[in-house]
């Protein structure tokens, strides 16, 4: 008979009557991968006699974060951030490179990057992730082999992922002073769609609770109407979520408007792409926002009425000087809001702070822009987007996914409301322990079987290869590494 296990802590962020609440002198009891009880220590000891408790002391136990645009590789933001503006086009693909394109990193490299990224996610308190990787170094999209490797890495670490190989129909290339989209071969296009369905079918049949298949076409402007329709058909056939990056930039918005005479949201709606299983990062370019000339709420109304989830990633926007207009306004309109990191560090504390600060500045004192609202989206909002009532909360019958944050860390300052304190003062390195599905996947900042120093050294080698790949693809490829990538001082 499986014994009952439990934890005690000074505080817990528990769930009741549709919302989170703070429980002092908190206890969680779990069996297997499910929570049996979340409440006070006294009631736990009265109700359950034979429980093996672990006392976590002066700490906060909270649900793990749900990262729906989770950084799944080694981030290129160090390359692109503050790169000389007058040379920004040097980072784009050249026509010469497109014509002879090859995979620039080995399969071993690509499998390693997901291991490195998933370790980082766990160490930042993410318990459920839908990874995103850059395909700028890829011949076309992600390969089936690298995503199979990513799935095995998730299983090895105990991280719950929603995963699938991304695919593209056309690549952005810098030609004659402007960016254009050049189609792939028909064989490449078909291969991407076939790989997507193969992965979904295979992992649906395997039914591993840690690897949940999804359909993840790359950016909307790199798709065709046919590929989007077929992507949605695959998602519906196997009843899985579908995620598409859309409404995130000027080039994309103008491309869709020019070719379809509609906004991206209206275009996706017209082809039957939008429903409650559709997830869209990033949702910036909507009608009534500062990014478009559309003064109607049509885009927002469609997203609300179709039950689409927007994945908000405030840190990555902020690095490029922009912000959602605004998070609270979207929520107030009834749009389902979840969150993602999409850059390094995959730190939800930082994302919640940055997002809330920007939103308060843009939209004044709207209640939906506060820390509690952001935290709700980073936990319960992600669960809703996935259709998982058993995620994002600590309550009876929920998955035993939780993080532990010690409150006796001097760097946190004084402790008021413990949740408000950590959202204002903590960062990912304050997460000491992580449990996913009833198993401790990190204790005292250590992940079983992982040598962080070895990972760090391999990541440096990978990063140098990635930097060289930018030079190889560029029209300006006669510079050496130091000339191509000058320091910021």
Image (tube, rainbow, N blue to C red):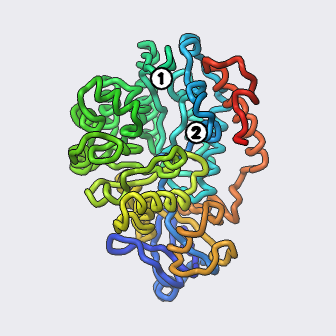
Is the C terminus in the top left, top right, bottom left or bottom right quadrant? top right
Q: Is residue 18 above or below residue 137?
A: below
- The local secondary structure at tag 1 comes to strand
How crowded is the residue under tag 2: few (<14 C-alpha within 10 Å), some, or many (20+)?
many
Residue at 62 percent of width and 64 percent of height: 431
How crowded is the residue under tag 1: few (<14 C-alpha within 10 Å), some, or many (20+)?
some
Q: CA distance from mark 2 to mark 1?
A: 26 Å
Q: Name the mark on residue 354.
A: none
Label 2 belongs to which residue? 150
Q: Nearer the viewer, residue 101 or 15?
A: 101
Q: Specify the quadrant of the image occupied by residue 425.
A: bottom right
Q: Is residue 23 above or below residue 175?
A: below
Image position, residue 227 (x, y; %): 34, 25
Label 1 belongs to which residue? 172
Image position, residue 26 (x, y; %): 52, 80
Residue at 75 percent of width and 45 percent of height: 456
Is the N terminus in the top left, top right, bottom left or bottom right quadrant? bottom right
């Amino acid at each position: 008979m499986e014994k009952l296990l439990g934890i005690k802590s000074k505080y817990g962020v528990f769930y009741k009557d549709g919302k989170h609440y703070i429980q002092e002198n908190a206890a969680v009891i779990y069996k297997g991968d499910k929570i049996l009880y979340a409440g006070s220590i006294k009631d736990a000891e009265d109700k359950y006699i034979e429980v093996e408790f672990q006392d976590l002391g002066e700490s906060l136990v909270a649900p793990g974060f749900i990262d729906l645009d989770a950084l799944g590789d080694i981030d290129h933001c160090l390359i692109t951030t503050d790169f000389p503006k007058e040379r920004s086009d040097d980072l784009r693909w050249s026509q010469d490179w497109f014509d002879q394109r090859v995979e620039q990193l080995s399969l071993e490299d690509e499998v390693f990057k997901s291991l490195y990224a998933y370790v980082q996610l766990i160490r930042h308190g993410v318990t459920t992730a839908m990874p995103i990787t850059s395909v700028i170094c890829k011949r076309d999209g992600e390969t089936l082999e690298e995503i199979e490797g990513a799935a095995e890495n998730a299983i090895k670490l105990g991280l719950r992922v929603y995963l699938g190989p991304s695919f593209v129909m056309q690549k952005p290339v810098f030609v004659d002073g402007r960016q254009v989209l050049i189609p792939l071969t028909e064989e490449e296009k078909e291969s991407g769609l076939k790989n997507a369905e193969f992965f979904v079918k295979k992992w649906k049949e395997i039914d591993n609770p840690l690897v949940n298949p999804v359909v993840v076409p790359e950016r909307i402007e790199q798709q065709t109407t046919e590929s989007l329709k077929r992507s949605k058909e695959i998602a519906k056939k196997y009843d899985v979520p579908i995620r598409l990056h859309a409404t995130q930039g000027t080039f994309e918005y103008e491309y869709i408007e020019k070719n379809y005479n509609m906004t991206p949201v209206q275009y996706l709606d017209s082809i039957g792409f939008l429903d409650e299983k559709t997830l869209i990062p990033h949702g910036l370019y909507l009608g009534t926002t500062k990014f478009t000339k559309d003064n109607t709420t049509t885009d927002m109304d469609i997203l609300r009425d179709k039950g689409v989830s927007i994945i908000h990633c405030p840190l990555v926007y902020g690095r490029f000087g922009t912000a959602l207009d605004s998070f609270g306004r979207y929520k107030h309109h009834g749009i389902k809001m979840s969150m993602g990191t999409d850059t390094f560090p995959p730190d939800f504390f930082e994302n919640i702070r940055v997002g809330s600060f920007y939103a308060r500045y843009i939209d004044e004192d709207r209640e939906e822009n506060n820390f509690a609202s952001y935290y709700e989206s980073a936990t319960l909002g992600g669960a809703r987007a996935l259709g998982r009532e058993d995620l994002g909360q600590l309550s009876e019958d929920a998955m035993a996914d939780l993080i532990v944050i010690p409150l006796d860390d001097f760097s946190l300052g004084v402790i008021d409301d413990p949740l408000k304190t950590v959202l204002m003062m903590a960062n990912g390195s304050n997460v000491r322990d992580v449990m996913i599905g009833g198993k401790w996947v990190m204790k005292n900042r250590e992940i079983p079987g992982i040598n962080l120093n070895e990972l760090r050294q391999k990541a440096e080698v990978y990063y140098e290869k990635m930097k060289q790949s930018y030079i190889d693809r560029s029209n300006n490829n006669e510079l050496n590494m130091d000339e191509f990538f000058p320091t910021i001082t």
